[in-house]
Amino acid sequence: MATIKEVASLAQVSIGTVSNVLNGKTNNAELIERVEDAMERLGYRPDANARSLKNTKTNSIGVILPNIINPDLAAFLSAIEMELREKGYSLLLKLTQNNGLLEKNAVNQCLEQCVDGIIIYSSAQKKFYEKSIRDSVPVIFINQQGVADQIADLIHLDYEAAFEKALQEFCIQGLDEVGIILESNLIEKQRLLEIYRRYYANTGNIKLINYSKELGFKGAYQLLCENSRIKAIVAGNYVISEGVKKAIQLLGFDNIPLVAFKESNWIEDDSVYAAQVGIPLKKIAQSAVKRLLYAIENPHTHEKVTETFSASYEVIRPLLSNVPKDSGQGKVLKLLMFDSPAAHGLSQLSKVYMKKNNIAVQCEILSYKGLEDALYKAAAEKAGHMDGFMMDILWLDGLVSTGILEPLSSVVAKNYLTSFLEGKVKEYAEKSGELYGIPFMAGTQLLFYQKDLFEDQKLKMAFYRMYGEILQPPATWAQFNLIAEFFTRSCNKKSPVKYGVACVQGENIYTAISFLNRLWAYGSDIFSAAGEVVINTNNALAALKNFIKSYQFAAETGVNTTWDEVVNEFKNGDSAMVILYDSHAVAINDYTQSKIAGNIGYSLIPGGCPVLGGWNMGVNYYSPHKKEMTDFLLWACGDEVAIPMALLGGTTLRKKYYLKNDLENMHPWKSLAMESYPLSRKRILPQTAASNPELYSYTIPHEICRILSGEITEEEALENIERELKKLILPHQ
């Protein structure tokens, strides 16, 4: 391995100069380039251990867990590791098997390794190592019962209310004997008995065990043999529940509902568990790391406090639970859909519905313009050859005016609509208080980027030297272009990627939407509240120039590109950043398709003005199968289908998808999408142009393409857009 002395020799500088470059203590570009070139040629890597001796920090954190057999704890460990890695820390893992002595030894071993802090996930009641951690390094305890003496920060996991909710539900259902097989110390024994006795008298139905499939099997088998009247069982974690399921199966008690203390996972849960008691372990991991690092970095102001996370109780409804029994067997339903991941996902998932009802659902998938033309043509002809269709939320007003949309308010229950994200049903599917569609495919925009590029210390230093600013996800469009320039190899020969940004291009709706992000962020708009054309302003000109500049830092495709094509470009790893709808980003974290999977950063888009996207499902007013189509769409857009649809490539406006921990690994940005939706703005059309949305699909992108080809200037483009838009809304202007 190369040494710092060899680097200095090859670069023809002193060892001190190499050290200054490594520690960011020089801005001499010529020296930095010589040193970095020498390091690259020699394959030199700074010795982290040697540097830690000087800094008295090891940048390592001890993590002590009972086990990683439990998938929830394995997921917790993964979340901890990711959070620490992003902050520049490594972890030292120790497992205790719920043994107090092993836990004490694990703490001492972490201290011997000079870790900067420790996270202890413990169910032990007695701490044998309080003296060793007191006033040593910052410690975060995570447990179910708390500690009497606040010797460290505590994250308390409270399962009591959710457990009681499960017992309440069993009582409501008339189940008079309920078995409990819990991990010891999950709930303090006296409190467990108090809660249980509020609903059931026979505490002999409670078994407290250590975690394992084998002990779960033994506990359940003995319990069912001792009391054949058991009508339901609550299992303490996923591992225990696996043993319980085996006992139930062997003894033939197939109708016993099983509730498990576990994180949500639709693939495991559907048709297996009646309900689950879950706690957000990823959020707990994030909180633990945040608080521990604060304590490490602020030893004089940090105070030891307790934070409580409460478990939630959730009933699991099977995928086909809301399928009506009389949905018209033997009929063929035809559905027109926009070519998108959601459309392909529903086309595949509809086979489950068809099998249950003996109904054929034929999905015809079209381009954006092809679908738009087909719908307006069908409306003009009052055609009933299709039964339902997807529609861009922008089209709603125009399609209502044509009479092709069947009103749905009288057939869609209000409680069906309450589980969509707040306010979105009105924005997506209502006109004049009447419901004309069901929200199907969600859409808010996020900034995605290759995370390692923004974390690389060498790149950060180079960016600061070039621009005098910190390299971080851009908050403004000016910063966006600056970063895009830095990561474009034709502008910066040392960029590790070819392009700063992947962009949609061409005369299409996608180009217009991308421009709207800038237009709104710069305080301008297309129409005023009164429907007047107001696009030709100084702010709009600044926004357009900024937008056109971005294309200097993107690949020249020479053809129209869609969101999906930009996704494919970004997945290839050649671009540093991209703005995408969450509904089209589903494949970027797929390790089988994407070179950047596992290396994806995400933030709100620059300027804070995402364009609200998304699609409704509508029923054709002229269809002979309106009831059957409505039944299918209510199922396809329902709560039970939200998670499997997302697994197959779709997105949803159902709160359940965003609040559950399912798909956190596949779509880690979904919680951020919830922050983006309230910021998202809907494209509008004046009433007089409601049935003519070509201003977004042609007028605006056509003029943008003319700028890019050098035919006209930005000023001329705005004049042309203004003139064409006024024609669309005449004679009212």
Image (cartoon, helix red, strand yellow):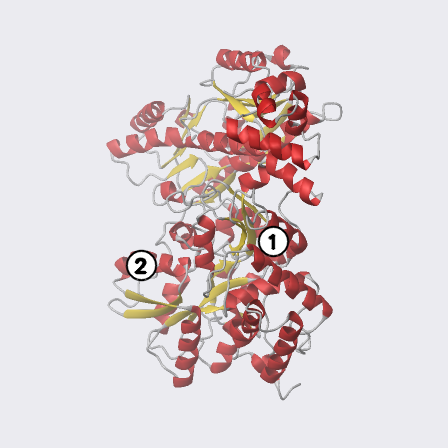
Residue picked out by circle 1:
605
Of label 1 and label 2, which has the lower sequence position? 2
Q: Is residue 730 above or below residue 703?
A: below
Q: Secondary structure at mark 1?
A: loop
**Image spot of residue 269 (x, y percent):** 38, 42
**Image spot of residue 548 (x, y percent):** 60, 63
The three-letter amino acid code for the residue at tag 1 is Ile
Q: What residue sits 61% from the left and 51% below the top? A: 485
Q: Is residue 122 visible?
A: no
The three-letter amino acid code for the residue at tag 2 is Tyr
**Image spot of residue 299 (x, y percent):** 72, 23
- Relative horizontal placement of residue 506, taking residue 137 as reference (left or right): left
Quarter of the figure with residue 14: top right
- How many other residues sit within 10 Å of disc 1, few (<14), some (14-19) or many (≥20)? many
- Residue occupying the far front of the picture: 12
Q: How far apart are labels 1 and 2 at the CA level?
A: 38 Å
Q: Which mark is residue 353?
A: 2
**Image spot of residue 284 (x, y percent):** 56, 34
Instruction: Report the front residue among 653 and 92.
Output: 92
Instruction: Report the front residue among 512 and 162.
Output: 512
Q: Is residue 417 above or below residue 49?
A: below
- Relative horizontal placement of residue 310, taking residue 95 as reference (left or right): right
Number of callouts: 2
Instruction: Report the front residue among 382 and 226.
Output: 382
